Image (tube, grey):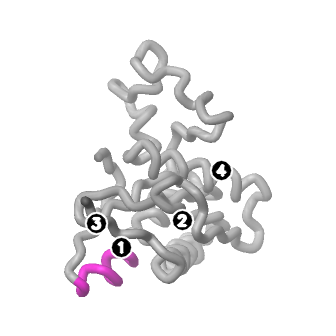
């Protein structure tokens, strides 16, 4: 039998707060979604002024990152991004009723080598979404590493 860590609301709120703080620093209205290991939202926040489409897009990114265990932008990073035309997963973004997001802004939450959730961001350009996602992961690391857990904090995550 395997014991697993579960991302809960306390951790999700810490991650959202860090992503929002980074978005405020960058002066970009973001929507942030923290999802569990099944890709379903634990916390979702749309900043004032953020696009009304942001919640669905952020959730899609968190869903994809958690479920497929990789940063969403890696699907379309040349030359070997699997969702690029001619590559093995071309068209994958049409999966799951269009919920699969194959562009920048989604990151798996990896703790102790296991994917326990996802973080998705929508509202900024690619660099801004990445910065806010990294801030969320770094906040989780700051919370969990004193308790003996290792959190992967980087943009390009592929498990």
Mark closer to the observer (2, 1): 2
Does label 2 or label 1 sit earlier along the sequence? 2
- Residue at mark 3: 3
* Magenta-drawn segment: 139-147
Determine whether label 3 and label 4 are within 8 Å by CB: no
Q: Residue at x 48, y 17 (%)?
A: 85
Mark closer to the observer (3, 4): 3
Image quarter of residue 23: bottom right
Element on which disc 3 rests: loop
User: Is 141 positioned to the left or the right of 130 in the image?
Assistant: left
Q: Residue at x 50, y 62 (%)?
A: 36
Spot occupied by residue 99 in the image (x, y as percentages of width and height) = 63, 41
Give the numbered dot on residue 57: 4
Does label 1 or label 4 sit earlier along the sequence? 4
Does label 3 or label 4 sit earlier along the sequence? 3
- Residue at mark 1: 138
Does label 2 or label 3 sit earlier along the sequence? 3
């Amino acid at each position: 039998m395997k014991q697993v860590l579960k991302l809960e609301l306390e951790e999700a709120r810490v991650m959202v707060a860090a992503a929002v703080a980074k978005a405020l620093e960058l002066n970009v209205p973001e929507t942030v979604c923290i999802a569990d290991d099944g890709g379903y939202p634990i916390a979702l926040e749309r900043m004032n002024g953020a696009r009304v489409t942001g919640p669905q897009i952020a959730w899609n990114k968190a869903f994809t990152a958690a479920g497929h265990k990789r940063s969403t932008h890696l699907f379309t990073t040349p030359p070997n991004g699997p969702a690029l035309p001619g590559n093995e997963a071309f068209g994958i973004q049409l999966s799951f009723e269009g919920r699969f997001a194959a562009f920048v802004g989604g990151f798996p939450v990896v703790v102790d080598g296991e994917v326990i959730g996802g973080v998705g961001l929508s509202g900024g350009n690619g660099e801004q979404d990445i910065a806010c996602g990294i801030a969320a992961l770094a906040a989780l690391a700051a919370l969990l590493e004193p308790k003996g857990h290792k959190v992967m904090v980087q943009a390009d995550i592929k498990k």
